[in-house]
Structure formats: C-alpha cells, structure tokens
C-alpha cells in the first residue's frame, strides 16, 4: 500500500472511531451540563487524533480532531437553542434528543469506517493489480527457439541449453514499454543504466552466456553446482547474486562494488529490458538473495567466446 493510501486510511478510521465514541457520550451525557458535554467532546477529539499521531502523521492528526470537535460542539449547542421559527425549533429539539444524536453519529461513524475499510481493500487490490501487471511486463519473454549457432557447457561438461529470440519487438516499442514499466513503480530514477533494452538475452544469459542467448532459470542451479559456486555471506566485487522466490530462481546479477557503510551495488539485466547498476535490495526481484563465489575465472560458460562488453570484470571499490 502506498504512503498516501495508508495516511488516508488512518485519518478515516480515526475520524470514524471518534464519531462513534462521541455518539456514546451524547447518549449518556446529554442531560448533563453544557460544560460537561463540551469537556466530553474535547476528550473525544483528543482521542481521535491518537491514531495518526501513533502512525507518525502529526499534521494529519488535526483532521479527525477537528471533525469530531465540530460535530460535538454543534450537537451540544443544538439541544439548547430556542428559535421563534417553528420548523427550526422542531428540528433542533429532535436533534437535541440523545438517542437521535447517538444514532446519527453511529450511522455516520459506521458508514465512514466501512467506507474507509472498503477503500483500503480497493487500494490493496489496485496495488496488487499494478504489481502483477508490472511483473508480467518484466517477466515477459519473446518466442524462443533452440540456438543453433552456439554451444555451452558447465565445467563438468554438462550441456546447458541456449535459446534465441525468434521474434523481437522494434527498438521503439521496447523502449516505450520499458520506460512505462520502470516509471510505474518508481524504478526509473533509482538505477544507473549501463546498457539498452534488448530482447536478445535475459539476465541469466547476460551473466552466463556472454549476452548472446537466453538461459532458462531452471538450468541455473545445476550450473552453480557444476561450476563449484559456494554461497558466501560477505560479498566481493565479481561475486554472483541469485534472487529466489521459494525454490524458484528469479534473477541473476553480478556484484560491482561495495560502498563504505553503504549498499552493495550490483549490475544486472532486467529480463528483456536494459542493464542497470542498482543496490542489491533495489530491484523488482525481491529481498531474498544469496551471494555466490566460484574459484573459476568469470561466469561465462565454457564454449562461449565473450566478444561483447565483459560482464564479469572485477570492479574495485572506490
């Protein structure tokens, strides 16, 4: 849920709760003195600002307090107004009855509470839909066919299937979709681009297949085993980063530098999109990842000549 949605929910629920409590006060204190009723209104107003204050929304706390205080003041005075206009007298006399006031406040407060919860749930649904659409865009891949121009093996001699994109979109279309996807969830300004969007390879192919082919995530675990990767807790530039969701591998990246008292910066290709430098926790692939290190030189599979930008060069920290 976004920060603005959470703020709205806290304010609405606090206002609703304050109105309901105010209704109970009107029911039991309506025949007491005006000073007692106003004191009860003040206490209720102060209680209603508690939710936003606890949540850290100091300025927004004034909203439920003001709404509840205004209602309490109007209703306390309404029961004591005498008017020469018959209609107004009847209206205010009815409004001055404690059971009427309690009922009105309960209805208003209950409606506001139910509405805020419904809005919260709708915001959650909308947020989930946006996230799902974003992940569908990120994980999209073009039609793939077995590569005929290259062969790759692990250090143990096991063949790793390579895949070619048989149909790619135009550069203009890819760039437009990428910009839209990255902007939707605010990633566009949180990364440093190091390469353009390209459907020729995916993140695993960028790391293991010299940026020339697609490599399926299902083959990565076997690749890690055959090439003697071991998990490490303290990363170094050049180490591998594997992101997972349960038993499924989502993403591969390479550690580029370690900032002093700062984040670990990695470089990776986001599916069909571009390559970026970003913090290890600053991607759409989640927060569950493992660092790996191998005694071998680089990450490129055996049998592949890397004539493109070197993907596995160790970058020394500044």
Image (cartoon, rainbow, N blue to C red):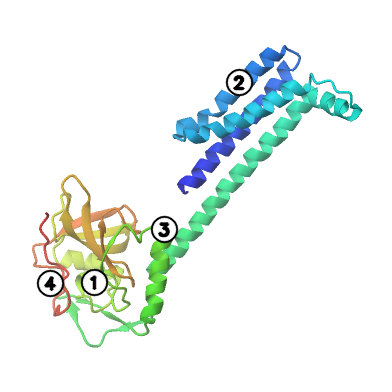
| Res 283 quadrant in image | bottom left
Q: Earlier in the sequence, mark 4 or mark 2?
A: 2
Q: Disc 3 on helix, strand or loop?
A: loop
Q: Is residue 32 above or below residue 64?
A: above
> Residue 42: which numbered mark, if any?
2
Residue wearing tag 3: 185
**x, y (%) of residue 194?**
24, 68
Single out the mark in the foreground, 1 or 4.
1
Tell me if label 1 and label 2 are in contact, CB under 8 Å: no
Q: Quadrant of residue 24?
A: top right
Left or right of 9 in this view: 138: left
Q: Secondary structure at mark 2?
A: helix
Residue 206: mark in rendering: 1
Circle 4 SS class: loop
Whichever of labels 1 and 3 marks the residue nearer the N terminus, that label is: 3
**Disc 1 + disc 4, Cβ < 8 Å:** no
Residue 183 % position (x, y): 40, 62
Question: Residue 229: where, in percent of width, then height?
Answer: 15, 61
């Amino acid at each position: 849920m976004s920060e603005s949605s959470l703020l709205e929910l806290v304010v609405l629920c606090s206002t609703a709760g304050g109105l309901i409590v105010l209704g109970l006060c009107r029911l039991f204190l309506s025949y007491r003195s005006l000073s007692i009723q106003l004191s009860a209104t003040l206490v209720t107003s102060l209680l209603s600002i508690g939710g936003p204050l606890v949540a850290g929304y100091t300025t927004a706390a004034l909203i439920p307090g003001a709404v509840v205080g205004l209602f309490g003041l109007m209703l306390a005075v309404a029961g004591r107004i005498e008017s020469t206009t018959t209609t107004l007298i009847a209206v205010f006399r009815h409004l001055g009855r404690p059971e009427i006031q309690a009922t009105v406040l309960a209805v208003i407060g209950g409606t506001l509470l139910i509405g805020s919860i419904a809005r919260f749930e709708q915001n959650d649904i909308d947020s989930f839909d946006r996230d799902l659409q974003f992940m569908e865009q990120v994980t999209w891949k073009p039609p793939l066919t077995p590569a005929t121009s290259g062969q790759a093996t692990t250090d143990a001699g096991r063949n790793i299937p390579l895949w070619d994109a048989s149909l790619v979109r135009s550069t203009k279309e890819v760039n437009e979709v990428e910009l839209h996807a990255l902007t939707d969830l605010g990633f566009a300004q949180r990364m440093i681009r190091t390469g353009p969007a390209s459907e020729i390879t995916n993140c695993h192919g960028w790391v293991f297949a010299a940026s020339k082919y697609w490599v399926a995530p299902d083959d990565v675990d076997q690749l890690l085993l055959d090439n003697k990767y071991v998990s490490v807790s303290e990363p170094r530039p050049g180490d591998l980063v594997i992101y997972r969701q349960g038993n499924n591998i989502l993403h591969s990246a390479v550690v580029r530098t370690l900032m002093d008292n700062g984040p670990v910066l990695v470089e990776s290709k986001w599916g069909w999109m571009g390559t970026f430098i970003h913090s290890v926790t600053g991607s759409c692939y989640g927060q569950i990842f493992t660092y790996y290190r191998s005694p071998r030189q680089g990450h490129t599979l055996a049998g592949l000549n890397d004539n493109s930008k070197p993907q596995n060069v160790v970058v020394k920290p500044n």
